[in-house]
Image: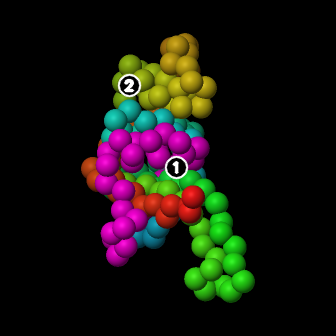
Amino acid sequence: MRRQDKTIDDPDELHRILDDAFVVHLGLVDNGRPYVVPLNFGREGDVLYVHCASEGRKLRCLAAQSAVCVEVEKLIRVTKGETACGAWTSHYESVIGFGTARIVESNDERERGLQAIMAKYSGRRDWSFKPETLAKTVVVRVDLETISGKRSPAPV
């Protein structure tokens, strides 16, 4: 990273930013071209879970290439100024991660992934899922191999 003063490398801080984010942007490769899709997600350690339809572009991309990139951001505020360059700036936190994604095969891990997603948005981990629902729900597991963060802090 060019601006080392903005680097976030504390794993707890990186996880907090992931947990605070409402949407993850999942970057995939589609026939040699980038494809990015926003998704709801849940996190357990350095594993992210997303769910999707049983067919579609995301799954076609993952079948061809399991390498992925994820990104989340939180806009804190925009500082306005009289001039365009130097005075106007955004204050934010962001995390970028690289890893591999795979479709979850077992119902136990599908449920674990869905519980992680539901816990993120509801605060609860006690949801029940019908076996037939679990059997047809596609859950994707993203194992993050590297994550890094960047912060442009707002002045106090």
- Give the quarter of the image for residue 105: top left
**SS at mark 1?**
strand
Would you place residue 41 above or below residue 149 in this image? above
Visible in this render: residue 140?
no
Residue 99 position within the rendered picture, expressed as x and y whole percent measured from the top left:
32, 51
Query: What residue range appears in magenta?
Result: 1-29
Instruction: Identify the amino acid type marked 1.
Output: Val
Q: Is there any visible trace of residue 85 in the rendered image? A: yes
Give the position of the N terminus as an image quadrant.
bottom left
The mark lying in front, picked from 1 and 2, is 1
Is residue 96 or residue 1 the one in the foreground? 1
Residue shown at the point (38%, 19%) measured from the top left: 108
What residue is at 64 percent from the left and 60 percent from the top?
77
Residue bearing mark 1 = 24
The type of residue carrying mark 2 is Glu
- The residue labelled by disc 2 is 109
Q: Can you tell which quarter of the image residue 141 is in?
A: top left
Outermost left residue: 145
